[in-house]
Amino acid sequence: MASLLAYQLRAASRKSFNHGALSLRARQLSTDLTNKATEDNEPKFLRAVEMFFDRAAKHSNASEETLKHIKSTDSVLSVTFPVEKDGKTVMIRGYRSQHSRHRLPCKGGIRFSSAVDLQEVEALSALMTYKCAVVDVPFGGGKGGIMIDPKEWTEAELERITRRFTLELCQKNFIGPGVDVPAPDVGTGPREMGWIADTYRNFNPQDVNGAACVTGKALSLGGVRGRTEATGLGVYYGVREFLSFPEVQAKMKHSGKIDGTSVVIQGFGNVGYWAAKFFEANGAKITGIIEHDVAAYNKNGINVEQLALWRKENGGSFRGFPDAQIIENPMSVLEAECDVLIPAALERQIGMRNAHKIRAKLIGEAANGPVTPAADEVLRSNGAVIIPDLLLNAGGVCVSYFEWAKNLSHLRFGRMNKRWDERSKEQLLSLVEGNAGHPLTEVERRQLIHGAEEHELVYSGLEDTMIVACNETRQTANAKNIDYRTAALANSINKIAASLAGSGSIFTHA
């Protein structure tokens, strides 16, 4: 049902949803609101990732030497270059981190934000390594960023910055279909990915696989259908799967059904918007949606598309929306009573200042690092179920993997087999009709013999990936009596360690 509804909703919602603008606004959540959530002595993002790693490492099968190897960042590129703006020369700083090259290429987004720094990029690239491993995507982890506020630059200036940064990546061998493959992130989208792909192609004109140097591209440039909504859809699949586990139902005192489940979502960018759409389409009540300035709340449920349209038409704010209560203190809605809380903004949104106030029964980390290590312990001690970021928001990299594979094969998914599948089904259906003596209507026949389109194959692959990864995490958690974050990370560590051992770890032994 989710796959069909998403396909139907996509065309209607594209006109009302500006992904780039919303992701930029979401970025503001990591500053003022983070300060309200975390204590001064709580670890920064990179240290928090390392603390979670150390906790999981104790439950892995890896040796101390292997753990040191996995934990360390392989390579970091830091560049500065000049760009002219308003007759003045401005120095731009950019970063690219390749956390692990146990599998190639490295994979991870590029964000444009004035808050970008080296530690953030390293932390995010580490998370990408563990994320790819937990969902069996054969990539190492990477991440990049340019320290600019995109709102302060024109489109032409942004293009120059993007192309110059890509040139730096080309010169330092930090980009390529088999080396390092960027993707969109905060402040970037298909437009920027198109500029990157074109720049790479101009410097590597003989690379027949050049389109695979970046994912998240527009369809006309080799993108894949389903990529835009992939992370939000993965969040829906993951929460749905965990709600089906009897032990989770018992802990939450929940029926296990999405229908009627109350959901609060923090962040209404690409991930939060699509997660809200999929939950709503399958019967959940979206009772709260939190943005950087205000939040919308309605215990009976918010119409997601109406709210998105209102914001577009009213200066980018929820204020004045007639069908919900507008809350001036948005962080207070994070603490509202609900079945499922989806932090879909940015890191460190739940810390020691507000963890004890969270009343959600299940926290699904759609953002990267939204819960600090100390807050994680508080939430779990209070009985909350936490689905960790490296598992729950892996939908984006899964579908990026599909796009990369599509670009390397130079073939649209479904092109070779769609009509053959339809003819085979039609022959079987005709045989069944003849034996049963009951012909179907033309509408019924079309529904039954329909061959899969590209987006349906992508949805199917993503759903299978999430189901398998969620169940692997559950099995490890139950077997070792540990929480789901620790279980997911332990599984990741074991998979990476097995890859390193299988390769022989050349040059690491005397």
Image (cartoon, grey):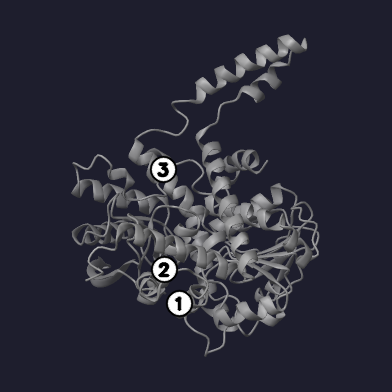
Amino acid type at image mark 1: Glu
Q: Identify residue for label 2.
A: 126
- Residue 397's spot in the image, x, y percent? 46, 54
Q: Choose the circle earlier in sequence order: 3 or 1.
A: 1
Q: CA distance from mark 3 to mark 2?
A: 25 Å
- Residue 40's spot in the image, x, y percent? 53, 89
| Horizontal arrangement in the rendering, residue 248 relative to residue 502 (left or right) | right
Q: Residues within 10 Å of mark 2 (few under 14, many from 20)?
A: many
- Foreground residue among 288 and 138: 138
| Label of residue 223 in the image | 3
- The answer to whether residue 236 is above or below residue 381 is above
Q: Are marks 1 and 2 in contact (CB under 8 Å)?
A: yes
| Label of residue 108 in the image | none
| Label of residue 50 in the image | 1
| Horizontal arrangement in the rendering, residue 395 relative to residue 318 (left or right) | left
| Horizontal arrangement in the rendering, residue 365 relative to residue 435 (left or right) | left
Mark 3 or mark 2, whichever is nearer to me = 2
Q: Residues within 10 Å of mark 1 (few under 14, many from 20)?
A: some
